[in-house]
Amino acid sequence: MKYWGFLGFLKNYSYIGYTIPKFDTELDKLNLYEFKRVWEFHRQNYKILALLNGMSVKEYANLYHLDISQTYFRFRDLGIAQLKRDFWARHRKQYTEEYAPQGLSVTVYIQDHGLLHKTAYLELTRKPLNHKWEYHRARYEALAATQNITIAQYAETYGLNPSTARRYIHRS
């Protein structure tokens, strides 16, 4: 059975087709290659579910009957917070493009999409960032990739408050 990559709204999270490993044996009885393959599948699968459903690591571990601490350990470098931000950014964009022009409320959108999160209303009514901060975020990411600078160093260089820069550059 072939599991084809997620080709959705964000290019950053697409990946090449991946064969679902067999789960016939328990994880502790697998050899090293099979063990890595199983966890790589779970890592890719979690990215997709987090982006599409806003699923937490704990919910994912319970769904697949995985050890919670092991799952947190294996997913530690996936950028879970960024996945959640992208999940809400997608919903916010969809709401503002499809529902807001028709005069439909946020509660209608929440009901239509089955969002059960307590933060759904707050996330959907949050105003988008000023274009100034989107520009700073893009410029910081380019500089951080080449020069390996921190947000505080970037803020000092461009005359920004470090706390504000940290909050807005990480948020977007």
Image (cartoon, helix red, strand yellow):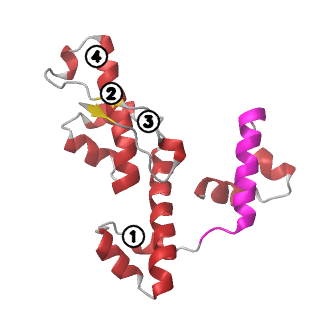
Q: Earlier in the sequence, mark 3 or mark 1?
A: 3
Q: How far apart in space, not on screen, are marks 3 and 1 (Cα)? A: 24 Å
Q: Residue furthest bottom?
A: 103
SS at mark 3 in the image: loop
Identified by mark 2, the residue type is: Trp
Q: Residue at x 76, y 33 (%)?
A: 146
Identified by mark 1, the residue type is: Ala
Q: Are marks 1 and 2 in contact (CB under 8 Å)?
A: no
Q: Residue at x 27, y 29 (%)?
A: 20
Q: Residue furthest left?
A: 24
Q: Which residue in the structure is indicated by mark 3?
A: 76
Q: Earlier in the sequence, mark 1 or mark 4?
A: 4
Q: How far apart in space, not on screen, are marks 2 and 4 (Cα)? A: 9 Å
Q: Nearer the viewer, residue 120 or 6?
A: 6
Measured as percent of width and height from the top left, residue 72 is found at 36, 37
Image mark for residue 120? 1
Q: Which residue in the structure is indicated by mark 2?
A: 39
SS at mark 4 in the image: helix
Q: Earlier in the sequence, mark 2 or mark 4?
A: 4
Q: Which residue in the structure is indicated by mark 4?
A: 34
Q: Residues within 10 Å of mark 4 (few under 14, many from 20)?
A: some
Q: Quadrant of residue 52?
A: bottom left
Q: Is residue 128 visible?
A: yes
Mark closer to the observer (3, 1): 1
Residue 141 colored magenta?
Answer: yes
Q: Which residues are magenta?
A: 128-148
Measured as percent of width and height from the top left, residue 6 is found at 41, 43
Measured as percent of width and height from the top left, residue 32 is found at 31, 12
